Image: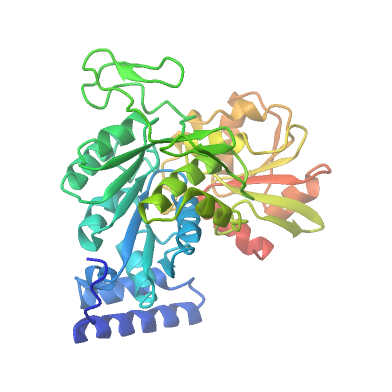
Amino acid sequence: MAGNTEPLSPRAKLAVTAGKAAAAVSRAAGRGSGSVIGGKVALRLDPDLLSALAQHLDVVLVSATNGKTTTTRLIAEALRASGPVVSNALGANMPAGITSALAGGSDAKYGVIEVDEKYLAGVARDVTPKAIALLNLSRDQLDRAAETRMLAEKWREGLSGSKAVIVANCDDPLIVWAASSSQNVVWVAAGQEWKDDAWSCPSCGGVMQRPGDDWFCAECGFRRPAPTWALSGDHVLDPHGSAWPIRLQLPGRANKANAATSAAVAAVFGVPPQVALERMYQVQAVAGRYDVVTFQGRQLRLLLAKNPAGWLETFSLIDPAPAPVVLSVNARGADGTDTSWLWDVDYPRLAGHPIFVIGDRKLDLAVRLEVAGLDFRVCETLDEAVQLAPPGQIELIANYTAFQDVRRRVGN
């Protein structure tokens, strides 16, 4: 539990040292940050290391299909008002990456940890979190991830005995189903633009009714709980009904929702909403997302979208037509190798934009855009797309590994 400063065992210390050495070798070889290989080596030497590293921390876990990296960063900024924070800020969110992050946090008071959806219940068992933030669930990485209802069921079972405060989005029926087995839930009305994964009741399979912002199942009575916190325009409403302004440098409605959830989490740790929200203003970009960079004399805004729900939110951020748009899609292991999700994305929203298509799966994407009746050009490289794009800031939207490729190319 947090507050227990029992020193690490000799075995745990050896595991941490070996993990850091492996990470350093990986970095020297130019293979990235080394956090994953370092964590794997450390856990091989001491399978209980994650629990040992977390014992002195007040931990919050953040999990979702979309927005978890940004929300993790916002919560970390808010909690720094009250003490030092250790966090896996770059998104290495499976046990090995989390272990690497915590190994660098011996002096921290708080651990703010993003967790991959599949690993949430196991990590929660290991680190005994004080709070868990659940934002949304939608289809993603179709070849790897379970169907969303099954994932919600896993969370429901895995979190049922947890003493953590669950801070959960009451506008997503799958999240409500997952959280409602828990003893202590704080409901946040954070909104849900993408609804195509939540038309059937997760409790009984009946058809969900969705009048306005409400939702309920007429067959079994499963329904939207009353929120304690709410996003209302540019403000967060706290449990007392006070409205606190959200001022972010990050764009879009989705990030206001992330800020509302982050404020509710910060309150669990005693940080008041005004302080939490003021600190969130410091965040300009998250692991390259939302950065505006100069490349070949042009301004590019870098936007990450990994699945249909994420693309829908991203389309609401971009400058209106005729702003040029570059789309890049890969289907490597970290993306999921199944690209059938492209057919669920509302690409007709891009009508009127000059579109340039790059990435490993540019032809898959080209077929989808052709069917949508859009004008586009297929390009071999980012350089070619930028050279062909008409004047104006270029909006570049890419999925996970395509986004990393772009960042390397532009030196971000």
Q: Residue furthest left?
A: 161
Q: Classify residue 179 as left or right of residue 315.
A: left
Q: Nearer the viewer, residue 248 or 152?
A: 248
Res 138 visible: no
Q: Nearer the viewer, residue 83 or 195?
A: 83
Rendered location of residue 6, percent (x, y): 21, 79
Which residue is painted at 67% across and 38% down in the image?
318
Task: Report the number of discs.
Answer: 0
From what the image shows, is residue 345 above or below residue 160? above
Rendered location of residue 153, percent (x, y): 22, 37
Q: Classify residue 12 as left or right of residue 234.
A: left
Which residue is painted at 21% across and 46% down in the image?
159
Rendered location of residue 20, percent (x, y): 37, 81
Which residue is painted at 29% across and 76% down in the image?
41
For residue 40, what is the image quadrant? bottom left
Res 291 visible: yes
Q: How is the image coloured?
A: rainbow
Q: Nearer the viewer, residue 338 or 222?
A: 222
Q: Quadrant of the N terminus?
A: bottom left
Rendered location of residue 220, percent (x, y): 21, 17
Q: Quadrant of the C terminus?
A: bottom right
